[in-house]
Each structure stands twice: as structure tokens, then as C-alpha cells.
Amino acid sequence: MQNPDFVLIGESDRRAGDTLEQIQRSVVGDSTPVRRMNLVNAEVAKIAVNTCVTTKISYANMLSELCEHLPGGDVSVVTRCHRPRQTNRSAVFQGGARITAAQCFPRDNAAFLAVARARGVNGDIAAATDTVNRRQVSRLAATVESHLAGTDQRVAVLGLSLQPDTNVVEESQG
């Protein structure tokens, strides 16, 4: 919250936006870009940004799965070829399977798809992204199970919340 890429403010009027920007600046400082817009555009921008991030995660998940099925394939090596302009590799490509890490991502993909369908717009990319990312939990579980096959080892999941030190479990992959 203290170092965001940008602050998005949906405002119903200029005065409310000015007040909210002043409050946000007291937290993030003057160097963080602030994007102000009406409430409709702010809501669309919020779900669009998160849908774009999950599309990148979906691509990383697909690439990881492909590398796992190619002899000598290593997603960590392959992703070194991605330029930062193409994707934020450090945030998206982190050594193999990447599980969606924020509760708002699946919800925002669903919201994006619902709005698109309600307006008669094709939202196939959001739908495909959601499908790929939801499949990662069972894929990760199968990988763990394959490593445990024939052993008496057990696995414990330490923490079910979305983020450390919270009790938020909605859509948590834990």
C-alpha cells in the first residue's frame, strides 16, 4: 500500500477526488502517479488491470506446464528471454507453477467477463485466463503427490489466508 505502481481514484466530483488524492499522497508521497477518473471508468480500469495481470499469470502457468512436459525444459531459463516491456518476469514468472496470488483476480476476471457478456462483447481471453489459472491448484497438487508417491511422507499447508498476517481466505489458493 505504501509503494503502489499508481493510485486509481474513482471520483463522483472534483472536490471528493481532491480530498482522496490528498489522503493518498500522505501515504504514498508525491512520486506515485495518480489516475483520476469517473466512477464507471475507475471500476473498468480496476478490473481491466487485474484481468491483464492474471492473463500474464495464465501465460506463465501455460509456459511452465509446457516446459514440464519437454525433456530438458526449464521455465526459469525460458523466461529470462522475456523483456520487462513484455511482462514483469519477477512478478509473474517465479520458478514453475504460479498460483494466482490475490483474491480480487478471479473475482475481477469474472466481473470483466460478466460485463463484457452483458454488453454483447466477446470476453474469451478473460474466460480462458480464469480457466487456466483455476486449473493450477489441481496441477500443483498432482505434482506434490507425484513426489510423495511410494513414500510415507506427509505434506502440511501452513496458512490458508490470502496474505501473511491476515484472516482473508476468500478465493485464497491456500
Image (cartoon, grey):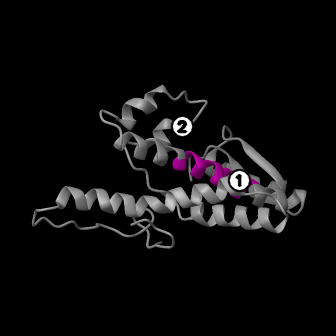
Please indicate, yes or no, whether residue 159 appears anywhere in the rendered image.
Answer: yes
Relative placement, left or right, of 79 versus 155 is: right
Q: Residue 48, labelled with which disc?
A: 1
Residue closest to the eye, 74 or 115 = 74
From the viewer's perspective, is residue 83 above or below residue 120?
above
Quarter location, residue 107: bottom right
Q: Please, which residue is most extreme toward the right here?
A: 13
Relative placement, left or right, of 38 versus 56 is: right
State the quadrant of the C terminus: bottom left
The kind of secondary structure element at disc 1 is helix
- How far across and down, in percent of the image, does residue 64 sit? 42, 43
From the viewer's perspective, is residue 14 above or below residue 111?
above
Residue occupied by mark 2:
88
- Kindly identify the residue that appears in the image at 54 percent across and 37 percent down: 88
Badge 1 amino acid: Ala
Residue closest to the eye, 83 or 3 = 83
- Kindly identify the residue that appears in the image at 62 percent across and 43 percent down: 5
Badge 2 amino acid: Asn
Magenta highlight range: 45-58
From the viewer's perspective, is residue 72 above or below residue 95?
above
- How far across and down, in percent of the image, does residue 126 sit? 66, 56
The kind of secondary structure element at disc 2 is loop
Relative placement, left or right, of 133 versus 104 is: left
Mark 2: few, some, or many residues within 10 Å (few <14, many ≥20)? few
Alpha carbon separation for disc pair 2 and 1: 17 Å
* 54 part of magenta stretch: yes
- Kindly identify the residue that appears in the image at 56 percent across and 53 percent down: 1
Chain-order first, disc 2 or disc 1: 1
Mark 1: few, some, or many residues within 10 Å (few <14, many ≥20)? some
- How far across and down, in percent of the image, does residue 10 sit? 79, 59
- Kindly identify the residue that appears in the image at 71 percent across and 63 percent down: 113
